[in-house]
Image: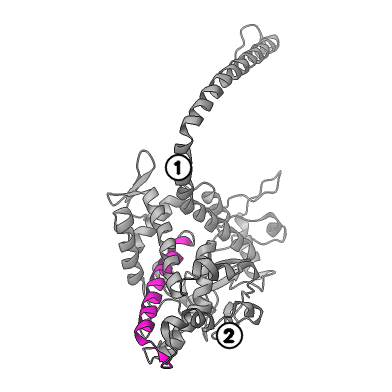
């Protein structure tokens, strides 16, 4: 049984309607870009005004080393000795904020300033919560992003990795299967600006928060919650409802429509169907739940994979007398990637995320083009008039040549088939 129809595109395709409410696509993308800009502003306050001028540029994403396997409790890229150049820990924040939060004359913390810093950190967390959910690609369900771990726990591997200079978020569709390492992994990649925020948050801001809370005797998180990305002080781990409320407020302000997690997912899935190239990427990533080798079909001439009821089998897997699903789960399983998320699938997920980034960033480029066009309008008008005259001459010549070719082909056809033959 299918879902209830609730969405359609406007005739001009510049907006879509969900549950009868119009969502303008340009406002939608502008709102999400605005959240990136807002996060930069808050980070400036958290790093003493030097985030955009200095700190962000110090993060060499391509230099960060990370492993895709479980390292042990509390371990992540921030604890990797190869990343010591990042100076993970609270020191960087303390140096930049020292004059603001430390009273050198009295040799004590400025508790009011510390509280303000922690309040800004909570605000940044809320924004980053939204950015991680919206910028990684087509979204999953709320619990997937709400339960992200920035480091390994005693049982589970972390969800945040740095792969080839890009932050990768790996989630599992089934949490119970994840404990047995038998779930379905999904990878989403964040664009560079958001990826740098994640690195700064894990490497510097979380350690600085722990030190300030301990030194000022403020509420600290419980030990079993330290690995989670989204929490504040001694509060419980943030849940989907909190994400939905925050996202709805942001979308209400930017688009005029209250869009929580559920509506956002429906809208973005429909938008994804219109993004050029995304549908083919989805087809490439389809895998059958069961490996039906008897039903495999291969093009007898080329040996290319043929759609087998939703399954796409790669020809070299078929030559090994098994389907692609069996190959990826049991033969030459790559040791360097979490669970059964293999390099080919990660590459596909990366391309899907890249297409989504281009879609969200596309409108900003369009706005710049409009401004440029308005400035050069008089000059372009003169140039277009000259070009139009030249193109008319060229069109006439091309049409004459095409007509001559058609006449010659018609004569040849009539020689072969008779005087009354036509196309």
Question: Mark 2, residues whose alpha carbon is within 10 Å: few (<14), some, or many (≥20)?
Answer: some
Provide the residue designation for mark 1. 371
- Label 2 or label 1, whichever lies nearer to me, is 1
- Residue at the top extreme of this rendering: 419
Who's the residue at 38% across and 53% down the image?
28
The residue at the point 67 percent across, 10 percent down is: 411
Q: Which mark is residue 265?
A: none
Count residues near mark 1 (Cα–Cα under 10 Å), then give few for <14, some for 14-19, many for 20+: few
Q: Is residue 185 visible?
A: no
Decide which of tag 2 and tag 1 comes sooner along the chain.
Answer: 2
Q: Which residues are magenta?
A: 106-135
Q: In the image, is residue 316 above or below residue 148?
A: above
Q: Is residue 321 magenta?
A: no
Res 72 label: 2
Q: Is residue 318 visible?
A: yes
Element class at badge 2: loop
Residue 359 point in image, percent of width and height: 48, 51
**133 drawn magenta:** yes
Residue 232, picture quadrant: bottom left
**411, 220: nearer the viewer:** 220
> Disc 2 to disc 1, how far (Cα)?
52 Å
Look at the numbered disc 1 and give the secondary structure of its residue.
Answer: helix
Residue at 36%, 89% in the rendered image: 218
Locate residue 88, reporting x and y percent. Answer: 56, 81
Q: Residue furthest front?
A: 105
């Amino acid at each position: 049984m299918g879902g209830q129809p609730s969405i359609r595109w406007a005739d001009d395709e510049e907006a879509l309607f969900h549950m009868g409410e119009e969502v303008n696509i340009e406002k939608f993308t502008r709102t999400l870009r605005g959240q990136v800009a807002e996060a930069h502003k808050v980070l400036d306050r958290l790093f003493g005004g030097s985030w955009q001028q200095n700190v962000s540029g110090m993060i060499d994403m391509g230099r960060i080393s990370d492993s895709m396997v479980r390292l042990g409790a509390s371990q992540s890229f921030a604890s990797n000795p190869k990343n010591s150049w990042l100076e993970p820990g609270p020191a960087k924040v303390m140096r930049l904020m020292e004059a603001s939060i430390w009273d050198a004359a009295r040799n004590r913390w400025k508790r009011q300033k510390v509280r303000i810093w922690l309040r800004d950190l909570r605000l940044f967390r809320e924004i980053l919560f939204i950015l991680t959910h919206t910028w990684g690609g087509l979204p999953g369900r709320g619990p997937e992003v709400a339960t992200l771990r920035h480091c390994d726990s005693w049982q589970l591997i972390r969800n945040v990795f740095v792969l080839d200079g890009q932050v990768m978020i790996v989630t599992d569709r089934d949490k119970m299967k994840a404990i047995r390492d038998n779930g379905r992994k999904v990878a989403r990649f964040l664009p560079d600006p958001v990826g740098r925020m994640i690195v700064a948050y894990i490497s510097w801001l979380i350690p600085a928060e722990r030190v300030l809370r301990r030194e000022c005797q403020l509420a600290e998180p419980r030990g079993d919650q330290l690995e989670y990305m989204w929490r504040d002080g001694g509060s419980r781990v943030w849940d989907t409802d909190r994400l939905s409320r925050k996202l709805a407020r942001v979308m209400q302000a930017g688009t005029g429509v209250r869009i929580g997690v559920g509506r956002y997912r429906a809208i973005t899935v429909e938008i994804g169907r219109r993004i050029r190239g995304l549908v083919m990427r989805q087809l490439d990533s389809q895998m059958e739940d069961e490996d039906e080798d008897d039903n495999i079909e291969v093009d007898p001439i080329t040996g290319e994979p043929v759609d087998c009821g939703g399954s796409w089998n790669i020809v070299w897997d078929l030559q090994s007398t098994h389907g692609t699903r069996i190959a990826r789960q049991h033969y030459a399983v790559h040791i360097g990637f979490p669970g059964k998320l293999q390099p080919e699938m990660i590459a596909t997920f990366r391309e899907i995320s890249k297409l989504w980034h281009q879609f969200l960033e596309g409108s900003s480029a369009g706005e710049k083009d409009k401004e440029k066009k308005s400035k050069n309008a008089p000059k372009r008008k003169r140039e277009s008039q000259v070009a139009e005259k030249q193109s008319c001459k060229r069109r006439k010549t091309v049409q004459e040549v095409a007509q001559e070719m058609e006449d010659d082909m018609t004569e040849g056809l009539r020689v072969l088939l008779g005087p009354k033959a036509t196309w």
